[in-house]
Image: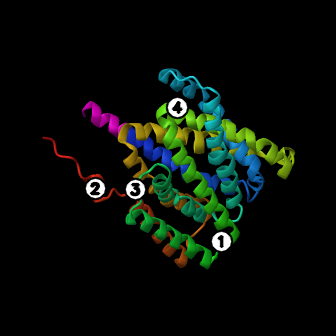
Amino acid sequence: MSGPERSSGIGLTALILGVLLFSTVEVASKLMQIGDGIAGSNPFWLACFRFVITGLVLAAPARSELRRRNVRIGLRDWMVLFGVGLVGVTLMASLFHLGIMFLPANIAALIFSCNPVFVVLFAALMLSEKITLRKLGAVLLCLTGVGALAKDRADGVGLQGILIMAAATLAFALYTVFSKKIIPRYGALTIITLASLIGGVILLPIAFTLEGVPFSEYGAVDWFGTVYLAIFGTAIGYFLYIHGIGHVGAGTGSMAFFLKPFAAAFFAWLILDEKFSTPEILAGIFILAGMITALTPGKSSRAKPQRR
């Protein structure tokens, strides 16, 4: 096997492992809400701990990346990163964990998997990328799927949870587009690390005000689950995902996200015995069709210029 082929194989393996780790987040969060777990019922503290720990775990490799890029972070940089952390962690993570309180894990994962579609739309609006009928069609397909879930609302699928998770999905899409604009300067790992720390710290007073100090009631399930979410579901998951994209390209990386709803549904069935109803399967078909439409390159993107 040649060097490039070996590198691509390692990258693809890392990419798939990263997506599989992402796919366990909803199930792990749900386990801390049912049975002996209570951390899942304190979504603001859970989001806070998850991302502060993530930032601390990734701090050393992020510092090395900054040194390699020879970047010194000034006041303007901190303001930019503050905004990214506020949207991508404080807002997104708190809404995400709050939404899981009102949804089965498999439905939460299905809705959140819409985020690549909205990344395509926001990129067109904010990064001067062309808005095409294909992109608008992708958004329409995903919205149809979410609408079908809202209409069905069976098996514990509440409208409140759908709306909250949809808002978290939009926040994550905005975070992704914001990050895309500044990745050339800071690097993806640095952005994830600093956004995690900034967003997590902002959540501290919010969690204390809304949820008090519930830690005396936390058991082994809660602390183990929180550490798992931070280290495996977020820090290692992001690291593997970024490492994989660096070896196989962003296009393949986006396509790999198709694995998440299937893997998350499998884990939810295996661990939580969650099943999809017929209307939920139909909604999932619309959402996956939207993802395929959004992430599959159009004819103009596949065409390569001829050399003269």
First in sequence: mark 1 or mark 4? 1
Mark nearer the viewer, 2 or 1: 2
Quadrant including the N terminus: top left
Amino acid bearing label 2: Ser
Q: Earlier in the sequence, mark 2 or mark 1?
A: 1
Residue 255 in the image: x percent, y percent? 40, 53
Above or below, 15 against 106 in this view is above
Tell me the residue that label 2 is attached to: 300
* Residue 267 is at least partly visible in this image: yes
* Kind of residue at badge 3: Lys
Direction left: furthest residue: 308
- The vertical placement of 50 against 184, above or below, is below
Q: Position of residue 138 (x, y in %)?
A: 44, 65
In the rendered structure, which segment of residues is drawn in magenta?
A: 1-10
Q: Is residue 134 left or right of residue 3?
A: right
Dot placed on the residue nearer the N-terminal end, 4 or 2: 4
Q: Amino acid at mark 1?
A: Val
The CA distance from mark 3 to mark 2 is 12 Å
Q: Secondary structure at mark 4?
A: helix
Q: Is residue 140 above or below residue 113?
A: below
48 in the magenta segment? no
Q: In what element is the residue under mark 1?
A: loop
Q: Is residue 54 visible?
A: no
Is residue 3 part of the magenta span, yes or no? yes
Disc 4: CA contacts within 10 A as few (<14), some (14-19) or many (>=20): many
